[in-house]
Image (tube, rainbow, N blue to C red):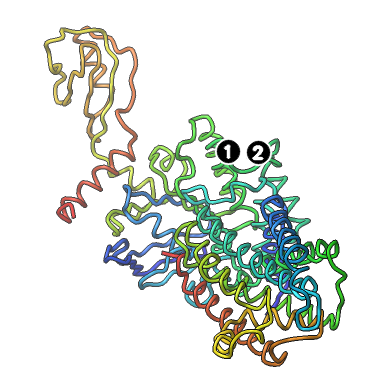
Amino acid sequence: MRKALEISNLKKVYKGGFEALKGIDLTVEEGDFFALLGPNGAGKSTTIGVITSLVNKTSGTVKVFDENIDTDLEAAKTYLGLVPQEFNFNQFESLTKILVNQAGYYGVNRATAHQRAEKYLKQLELWDKRNEAGRMLSGGMKRRLMIARALMHEPKVLILDEPTAGVDIELRRSMWDFLRELNQQGITIILTTHYLEEAEMLCRNIAIIDKGTIVKNTDMKSLLATLTVETFVLDIDPVDGNQTSLELGDYVNRLVDNHTLEVDVEKTQTINAVFSQLSSLGINVNSMRNKSNRLEELFVSLIENNQNTTGGQ
Amino acid sequence: MLSSVNFIALKSILHKEVHRFMRIWVQTLVPPAITISLYFVIFGSLIGSRIGEMAGFDYMSFIVPGLIMMSVITNSYSNVASSFFSAKWQRNVEEMLVAPVPNWVIVAGYVGGGMTRGILVGLIVTLISLLFVDIQIHNIWVIILTVCLTSATFALGGLINAVFAGSFDDISIIPTFVLTPLTYLGGVFYSISMLPDFWQGVSQINPIVYMVNAFRYGFLGISDVSLTVAFSVLGVFIVTLFAIAMTLISKGIGLRS
C-alpha cells in the first residue's frame, strides 16, 4: 500500500512566536479514511494548511504520494483536493462558473469541466442552483459546493476541514454517505471534525492532536478498545427524589433526577447485571442511551491527560 | 514552459477576470466613458476652442491620445488591484494557490485581465472621441505597442498594490495620491516643451510622460521624448514590476501564513 501522505517532524512557528506545530509525524495510507481530531487551536488547520501550501512551514517534510512539497509542489498539488473550513469561493460567481474555473486551474478543459460540474452538482443536489451566485446558497449548500469544487480535478486525496460544521443532521448523514462512496471508489479521505460521532462512524484510523503535538495515532478499533469505562443514561420509573444513587452492587451510579440514572459500566462488567439489579429493586427501565459517544470520552480523557502533562500551557 | 495544463489554467484565470468586469460593466466600462466624454466636452470643445493650436494641432486633437492613455492606465491598474484584492479578501485566491498553477501563470492571468479591460476602455473612449474630432493615425504599430506595454505596466502595478493592501482603502491610495497627479502632470493636456527648463527636467522622471508621448506619436507623429527612450522606460518598468510581483507571490506575501 502506498503512502498517500507522509509528514515528518513538521514544525510551524507563526510570526510572534506561537508554535502551532511542534514536530509532528503522521502517515496516511492510500485508500484510508483518516480522522485528524483535536480541540480548537490544536494545529489541525495549520497541518492542513501546510499540506495544501496555504501555510509556509518552518521545518520538516511533507510528501503526497512520494512527491515532496519542497521539491515537487505542483505534482503534489495535483493529488490533493481541499474542502476548507471557511467558505472561500467567489460569492458573486455562479456555481457552474466556480466549478469550471477551479477545474481549469488543474488543467481540465472546459468541456470535461462542464461534464464534471453537472455530475457533482447533481450528486450533491445542487443542480437546480447551478446558475445562482454562491452567496445565495444556504450554509449546507455552500459546504456541498466546496466538496464539489474539491472533486473537480478528481483528486486522489480529499482533505475536509470540518465539512459538516453547522449542517443539519439529515444533510450531515447524506454527506457521510457521499464521503463513504468516494472512499469506496479509492479516494483517500482525511477529515477533521468536532463531531466525534462522525469520526467514529466514518474513519478507520485516527490521530489526535493537541497543542501542536500528536497525542494519539492509531486505528479506530484499537483506540475504542482502550475505553475502560462507559457511562449509560437510563430512563427509569420515578424513585424517591431524595436519593443521590441506587444500591446496584459494584456499579457506580448517580441519580440525575428522580427518573434519570447514570451508571458507569467497566469493561469487565456487563450491562445485563445492571438490569437485574434494577429489576430486583422493582425499578423498570424505559429507555437507555450512552451518556456520550465512546470516542468523545476517549478524546476528552486524552486531551485532559495532555493538558496535565504540559501543565495546561 | 507553457504546457497545455498551464495554458488551460491561464485561459481560466483570464476568462474569470474578463467575465468579472463584463458582469459589472456598469461599474467598470460606463464610468470611464462618461468621465472621458466630460473631458472632451469641457477641455476639448469648450475650453479647447479658446486655446487654439498646440504643437501644430488643434487642442482637441492634441489631448485625445493622452485622454485615451489616461483611461487605459486607470482601468488596467484598478481592474487588477480591485480584483486581486477582492480575491484575497474573499479568500478565493486560495482556489489558485492550492492548485498546481505556477506563479507566473497567476501573474500573467491577472495582468492579462487588467490589460483587456484597459484596452477595451481605451477602445470605447476612442470611439467616443470620434464624435468630437477626426482621429488621424500616424503609426498603428506604435499605438498598439504603446497601449499594450502601458496597460501591462499598470496592471502589474495594480497587482503589487493588491498584494500589499490590507483593506479596500489601501487599493485607492496609490491611484488617488500617485497615479492621478502623475497622469495630470504627464503631458496629457500640454506639451512639456511649454514648461520652464526646471519643470521640463522634473517631468523627465515621470514615466507617464513617456507613455503619453509615445502614444501621441502613434496618432499625430509628434512627441516630446525619443521613442527609443520611451520604449526603454516601458521595458524597464515591465521587467522590474514583473520581478517584484513574482517575488511577492512566490513568497506568499499577504497570501500565505
Image location (x, y in percent) of residue B107: 61, 71
Q: Secondary structure at mark 2?
A: loop
Tell me the residue that label 1 is attached to: A141
Please say if the residues under marks 1 and 2 sit with CB atoms less than 8 Å apart.
yes
Image location (x, y in percent) of residue B207: 60, 82
Image location (x, y in percent) of residue B203: 58, 84
Q: Residues within 10 Å of mark 2 (few under 14, many from 20)?
A: many
Q: Which quadrant would residue B86 be assigned to in this image?
A: bottom right
Say what amino acid the circle numbered 2 marks.
Leu
Question: Which mark, residue A126?
Answer: 2
Q: Nearer the viewer, residue A19 or A98?
A: A98
Q: Nearer the viewer, residue B145 or B20?
A: B145
Q: Is residue A253 above or below residue A212?
A: above
Residue at (33, 65) in percent of width and height = A14
Question: Which mark, residue A219?
Answer: none
Left or right of B160 on screen, residue B127: right
Residue at (26, 42) in percent of width and height = A300
